[in-house]
Amino acid sequence: MSSYKGHLSRYVPLTPVESRSVTIVIPALNEEGNLEPLLLSVEKAFQKLGFTLPVLLIDDGSTDGSQEILAKLIKQYSFLQLIRHPQRRGVTEVWKTAIANVKTDWICWSQADLESDPATDLPLLLNACKPGTDGVAGWRQQRGDGKILASKFANTACQLAFGLKIHDMNWIKLVRRDLLLDLQLEVTTHRYLLAILAAKGYRITEVPTPWYPRFSGSSKFGRKRLISSAIDFSKAWWWFYFQHRPILPLRYLVAILEASKVGFRAGREAFYMQIDTEAGR
């Protein structure tokens, strides 16, 4: 039985809670200290929901003890599936691996560092996805990772350029898998996935979720990511407005120019922060 309802020109899938056609995707790189509590928290989420969903953990070339721990965990949890990249490929490639291997109607993108607690956040995301919604983003509350300013720059730029109406686009998220099949992730990258969908007219909403300090290990993303994020924004903006849709309505020009200013300010701030960091070494 199809999980799509109605006979509309635009398919509207059943909500994730209705269809239970959802795969939890978790990217992981050198997260050996987080894997056991992570899967325990996922199991608690399923107990709260009253049903179990498949979990696809994609190991992006870990060099710590993750392989040995995952070999044990896959025997312990029947819902767990593993894919391993032989070397680190980056988050966009992890997304591409997920899209190629997931067959459910929805993808729920989670985190392995436990800054997001699946026991709380998975039910929040799933229950926030109401009929007619195409994607739901988690909005970090009381965030304390020192990246709020950079995140605000990026989200403001996307609000201006793409009409994205959420506060935290680059965090945990729930999104329709079919909408991702035709996206050129090499250009839009994982960072601006929700922004591009919003610009295409899909309904992207958000739900507040608690933020926690990383449980174990260290972040894989530093200040250099601010520079690459500004570059990726420029690429995604150019692709959407000048390649994807070459006839640009005049009413978008002011918004695009304003968004460009925000993007360039973010890049400039990242550049100066990097100089300060290197000077302090």
Image (spheres, grey):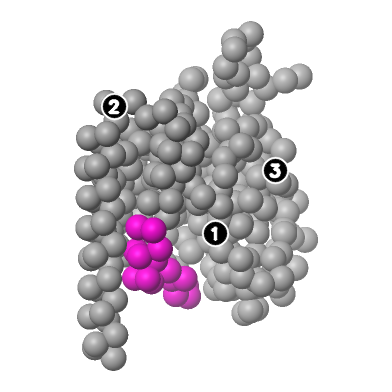
Q: Is residue 72 above or below residue 242?
A: below
Query: Horizontally, is 273 left or right of 249 in the view?
Result: left
Q: Nearer the viewer, mark 1 or mark 3?
A: 1
Q: Nearer the viewer, mark 1 or mark 2?
A: 2
Q: Position of residue 229 (x, y in %)?
A: 38, 58
Q: Which residue is mark 3?
A: 102
Residue 198 sits in which quadrant? top left
Image quadrant in which the C terminus is located = bottom left
The reply to whether discs 1 and 3 touch (Cβ–Cβ < 8 Å) is: no
Image quadrant in which the N terminus is located = top right
Amino acid beneath label 2 = Leu
- CA–CA distance between discs 1 and 2? 34 Å
Residue 128 sits in which quadrant? top left
Q: Nearer the viewer, residue 143 or 74?
A: 143
Q: Which mark is residue 91?
A: 1
- CA–CA distance between discs 2 and 3? 39 Å
Q: Among all residues in the image, which is located at the extreme top?
A: 7
Q: Nearer the viewer, mark 2 or mark 3?
A: 2
Circle nearer the N terminus (2, 3): 3
Q: Which residue is mark 2?
A: 250
Q: Which residues are magenta?
A: 216-231
Q: Position of residue 170 (x, y in %)?
A: 41, 50
The tally of labels here is 3
Disc 2 is placed on an element classified as helix
Disc 3 is placed on an element classified as loop
The magenta stretch spans residue 230: yes
